[in-house]
Image (spheres, helix red, strand yellow):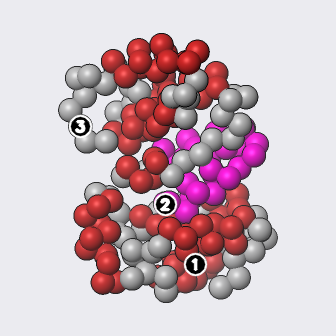
Amino acid sequence: MILRIDKWTEKDRIIFLEYLKTFGESEKIPRSASVLNTKSPTLAIKTADMVKITKGIMEGNYTSFLDLGIDDYYESIAIYGLIISRMKDLDTFLHYLYKYLDYMNCWAHCDLMHFPDPFKHYETYFALSRKFRTDQRVMVRRLSLFILFHYRKEEEHLDFILESLLDFQDDNEYY
């Protein structure tokens, strides 16, 4: 499949999902589903293949791809996250991050995230972390902690990070 597309359509969505299935390893699905603990069906696609697919999509109109909101499989959601993790523009990243929050449903969807210029925009990310840590969605709260994880080696941020961790001491949900 050619992934460099100028304008993704519903027809492309259907073709893309069929293409995605060709990378699946059916014998690994039970283990993959168990490890990921995802609510989405999984195809057991290797991460390296998802990264390759992501790079192909990003050669074209990747925001058009994201606008389709393809959330049929764990992997299609992960590809969405991998795409936004490669964005350079903070405003575009934030726009799609807020959409991604509704798709994330397992630890891996959070843990694959990268943030544009984390040290340049740390105030923005700290504000997101504060906002996300009271969210009703478990994985959004996990992302709140994951954001802070990027700053764990920065001594000037440790007090904020430790204070933030205290907000989770009574949280009993898995993340």
Q: Position of residue 62 (x, y in %)?
A: 71, 62
Q: Is residue 39 visible?
A: no
* Element on which disc 3 rests: loop
Marks counted in the figure total: 3
- Looking at the rendered image, the disc whose residue lies closer to the viewer, 1 or 3, is 3
Q: Position of residue 137 (x, y in %)?
A: 36, 38
The part of the image, by quadrant, that contains residue 145 is top left
Question: Which quadrant of the rendered structure holds the C terminus?
Answer: top left
Query: What residue is disc 3 on?
Result: 173
- Residue range in magenta is 77-102
Look at the picture and state if 97 lies above or below 7.
above
Kindly report the secondary structure that dominates the magenta region of the rendered protein: helix
Q: Earlier in the sequence, mark 1 or mark 3?
A: 1
Residue type beneath disc 2? Ile
Q: Which residue is mark 1?
A: 16
Q: Give me the residue at 42% from left, 54% from top.
A: 108
Residue 10 drawn above or below residue 2: above
Residue type, mark 1 in image: Phe
Whole-angstrom CA distance, mark 2 to mark 3, is 22 Å
Residue 72: % across, % down: 44, 68
Of marks 1 and 2, which one's residue comes earlier in the chain?
1
Residue found 46% across the figure and 67% down from its top: 75
How far apart marks 1 and 2 lie (CA) works out to 13 Å
Left or right: where does residue 157 sit relative to residue 39? Answer: right
* Disc assigned to residue 77: 2
Label 2 secondary element:
helix
